[in-house]
Image (cartoon, rainbow, N blue to C red):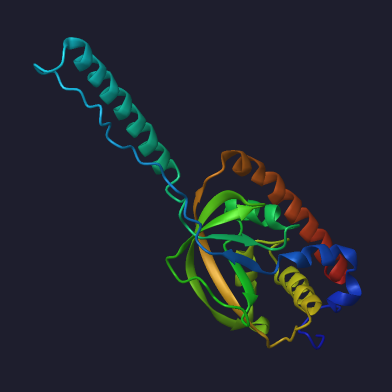
Amino acid sequence: MTPSGWPCQSPPMAIGADLALFAFRAFRCFTPPTLHATGCLVQSQYEVLASHDFGWKHATMAAKRRQITGTAEIEMNSQRDTEWWSDLPRTSFGSPEMEVRLAALIVSGRKRATVWDAAQDNPTKPGMRWIVTAGDRPVAVIETVTVGQCSFSSIDKDFAFEEGEGDRSLVFWKAVHETFFRNAGHFAPDMMLWCETFRLIEAIDTAFAEAASAHVLAEQVEGEALVAGLCPQER
């Protein structure tokens, strides 16, 4: 066991560029709520009623106007129902290089947990919902289940599995997260992290969801290759 708690060789000596690529993923980016303006249908002042002051032609025009307005209201309500999530705060996972991959893991249901440095703020709480973005593209809605602080060294295999990254092993989790925090200049085995679990509420981008399985397969294969290189004696 090395000083950093490794079951095999220390990651900085074992990995090179491959592990460095994975190390872009160890944080969650939060942005404040984005309020989207919604249009309001205003009752037309030209509400013509069939009366002694107006002829049949004006009454017919009023009826058509009400019919058109009613149709527009139905369409707008349908759009509001479809985009019920539009006013939620937004978040992304990892660096711009990793956003799409990690969002795909979330959409697939594979990734259900994350961590970030406890020196940073915690903007979420159980029950709070977030839009997950991939390159500013909203792709899913998640809901925080639990959030609290834990030390790097206390992360266990169950939490690593819930994070859903690589081959989902604790070896992979420690490798990529230690490398990330070392690159950030403040790694310590006893450093404190925010540890969050969440659940997928809805995949809101059909095309993105359909492509997610390819990302999941690539993540698994790449993770297995990385772990095999770190601990060849275990293979």
From this view, report whether residue 161 is shown above or below residue 222: below
Q: Residue 33's x, y, as percent?
A: 50, 61
Question: Which residue reaches farthest front?
Answer: 53
Q: Residue at x 45, y 65 (%)?
A: 128
Q: Is residue 108 visible?
A: no
Left or right: where 114 falls relative to 66: right
Q: Quadrant of the C terminus?
A: bottom right
From this view, report whether residue 109 is shown above or below residue 25: above
Task: Give the quadrant of residue 178.
Answer: bottom right
Q: Residue at x 69, y 63 (%)?
A: 94
Q: Residue 122's x, y, as percent?
A: 54, 75
Q: Is residue 22 visible?
A: yes
Q: Nearer the viewer, residue 135 or 39?
A: 39
Left or right: where 162 falls relative to 184: left
Q: Nearer the viewer, residue 197 or 7?
A: 197
Q: Residue 121's x, y, as percent?
A: 57, 77
Q: Residue 86's x, y, as percent?
A: 47, 50
Q: Nearer the viewer, residue 58 or 92?
A: 58
